Amino acid sequence: RVAQAGSALSLNRQVYEALTAIDLEGSTPATRHYVERTLLSYCLAGVNKDQATRDRLQALHEKATRLSLEFSRNIQEGGKTIKATAAELDGLPADYLARHQPDSEGRITLSTDQPDMQPVMTFASNAALRERMFFAYNTRAYPVNQQILLDLLATRQEIASVLGFRSWADLATADQMMGSAANVRTFLAKLNEASVDGARREHEL
């Protein structure tokens, strides 16, 4: 309901017109910047489109919100577990080990919940254990979330197209320092180049 209310506000033409009517003469640079950024966010939402287009955008935003909530709920409820041996828990703190006792077969059950997952990814010396936990954590709610994600991506693309953008990424970065999806891709390529050797060395550990 909060997200839907926010979407409705961002498409409210009367609020937008009231903001554009603000006299910024003599205002501080901070005030001017804030008002200009607020007006930009309204334009990026589509407030300057005709009523039919605004209604369509409102419906699309509500659909995206429902899909996002369903996606997140499935992840929260789709936790997984992995099995480990005592030897594989080398490096983990004593209190963690005390909370995770082996079963009758000597196997220890670890969940993908944060209190179990994060210490493994941070402290475990065993790379194979970290890898198993990584894949279990990042495949929660799969495959149930696959179609939901595809529907969400399609909805976001439709929103971007209605607003005149090539992609959702271009829309999402239009009011950010990056400015465009192309700039983000360039930045990520440079980041990858600078960090890949270190990542390989860490993986070998």
Image (tube, helix red, strand yellow):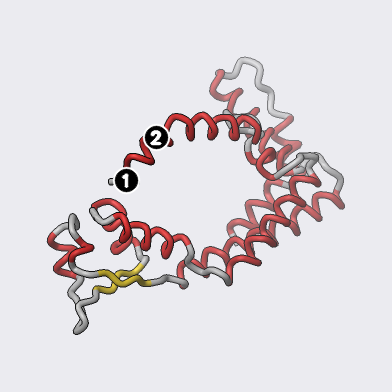
Which residue does the image show at 54% across and 33% down from the upper left? 189
Report helix, strand or loop for mark 1.
helix
Q: Is residue 166 left or right of residue 69?
A: right
Residue 106 marker? none
Is disc 1 surrounded by few (<14), some (14 to 19) or many (20+) residues within 10 Å? few
Which residue does the image show at 46% across and 60% down from the upper left? 138
- Of mark 1 and mark 2, the one earlier in the sequence is 2
Which residue does the image show at 30% across and 72% down from the upper left? 83
Residue lying farthest top? Answer: 26
Front residue of 12/123: it is: 123
User: In the image, is residue 108 above or below residue 177?
Assistant: below
Residue placed under numbered mark 1 in the picture: 204
User: In the image, is residue 105 above or below residue 31?
Assistant: below
Report helix, strand or loop for mark 2.
helix
**Residue 169's x, y, as percent?**
66, 42
Residue lying farthest front? Answer: 204
Residue placed under numbered mark 2 in the picture: 197
Q: CA distance from mark 1 to mark 2?
A: 11 Å
Q: Is residue 37 left or right of residue 43?
A: left
Amino acid at dot 1: Glu
Q: Is residue 87 left or right of residue 115?
A: left
Which residue does the image show at 24% across and 76% down from the upper left? 107
User: In the image, is residue 74 above or below residue 199?
Assistant: below
**Residue 40's x, y, as percent?**
68, 33
> Are dots 1 and 2 in contact, CB under 8 Å?
no
Amino acid at dot 2: Asp
Residue lying farthest bottom? Answer: 104
